Image (cartoon, rainbow, N blue to C red):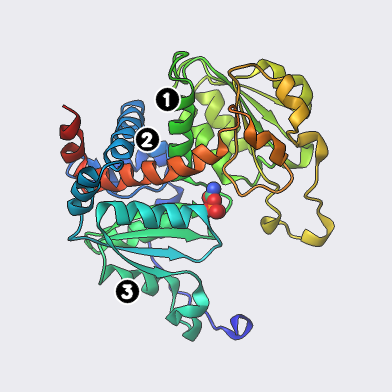
Amino acid sequence: MDDQKEVTVQNYKGWEDFYNIEKSDKLDFFMRDGRMIDILFAQQFDRSFLDSMCRLATQIRRMALTKVGARKLSSLLSHKRAMLYFVQPSTRTFISFLNACHILGLKISEIRGTTTSSEVKGESQEDTIRTFASYVDLIIIRHPEAGFAEKTAWILNQNKLPVAVINGGSGPDQHPTQALLDIYTLEQSFRNIGGLDGKKIAMVGDLKRGRTVRSLSYLMRNYKDITLYFVSPEIFQMKDDIKSFLKKHRIEFHETDDFAGVMPHVDAIYMTRIQKEYSEAPAQESDIYPNFHFTKEHLAVIQSHCIVLHPLPRRYEIEVEVDKDPRAVYWKQERNGMWMRTALISYIFGVADKIAVEFK
Ligand code: CP
């Protein structure tokens, strides 16, 4: 059915020019009443925001443990509605956002593929999201196209529609809420050894097409004395835009294909999957690069405080036997996604203070 679909292409004058503006020069466009309303790319976050989100995520996690606390949380946004528009596969981003909405009492609608929306009749994707805006207060989008979440926010803001937009993953470009939960996991794991400042982090695998490592790299600007090691096969090296950003902000980074050589020296290892879905010739592309896998033997090589992360889903990058080691934090990282996304939605709708007051 998809093959026969006739897509309506609409020309939004001004969009291309806006998209090409430097991200740091258009932050105000996505703010209202002094708060970010649309969460689109990692360059929107500064240190004070990141610290406050980590604090809030922990407060929500603690509050949700009790019936009384959970009831209070679920009353905060029971008058709001959210749309989950996920037209690219997802398990954990979708479910963690869904549960974040449940925790805060939001009512949910969802579309999980263009074949079940009127896009199958040829409705444009822009008219589709404008339609959502007729019904809900928040649209959470996962889309294969870089910039589509930003375009959604741009269209809605241009039309003065008071609907917040969150980017839940935009093609191989960015995954800003994953970066938030990654920061939360790193900060939590290092809370007894000075937090994330001063740490050495290895990012391993498909750095070229992995959106999580791109968003996380942008956030390193907010931390002191970070050193990054980009560890990948040559064909999957980190793209120049990220490297230019790091140079501009004087963040030390190294590129290598010697994973075994880097491992003993770092405080965190962030594993990633080969993103074969973006390959032009998937049948010819391998997704098994054993030199970039983390095995149980490596547990003896890394430092006693070194944590192993992965945004998941994984394939062969981490042996399951590693899961039992307390330094393997990827399942915790996954769960942190729900708390961090709950914190983010609370912030967007201005109810974070009502949570913080419970801890005064
Ligand atoms: N980490 C992540 O984005 O996972 P999903 O693709 O399952 O949402």
What residue is drawn where x is 67% and y is 45%? 273
Q: Which mark is residue 131?
A: 3
Circle 1 Cα neighbour tier, 10 Å, few/some/many (<14 / 14–19 / ≥20): some
Give the quadrant of the C terminus.
top left
Give the answer, above or below, for where 243 lies relative to 178: above
Contact (Cβ within 8 Å) of mark 2 with mark 3: no
Contact (Cβ within 8 Å) of mark 1 with mark 2: yes
Q: Which mark is residue 222?
A: 1
Residue 260: percent from the left, percent from the top? 78, 24
Residue linked to disc 2? 45
Residue 279 sits in quarter:
bottom right
Give the quadrant of the N terminus.
bottom right
Q: Label 1, label 2: how many angstroms apart (C-alpha)?
A: 8 Å
Amino acid carrying label 2: it is: Phe
What residue is drawn where x is 52% and y is 78%? 115
What residue is drawn where x is 81% and y is 34%? 291
In terms of sequence position, does the residue under pointer 2 or pointer 3 come before the other?
2
Amino acid carrying label 3: it is: Thr
What SS does tag 2 mark? Answer: loop
Residue 74: percent from the left, percent from the top? 23, 52
What SS does tag 3 mark? Answer: helix
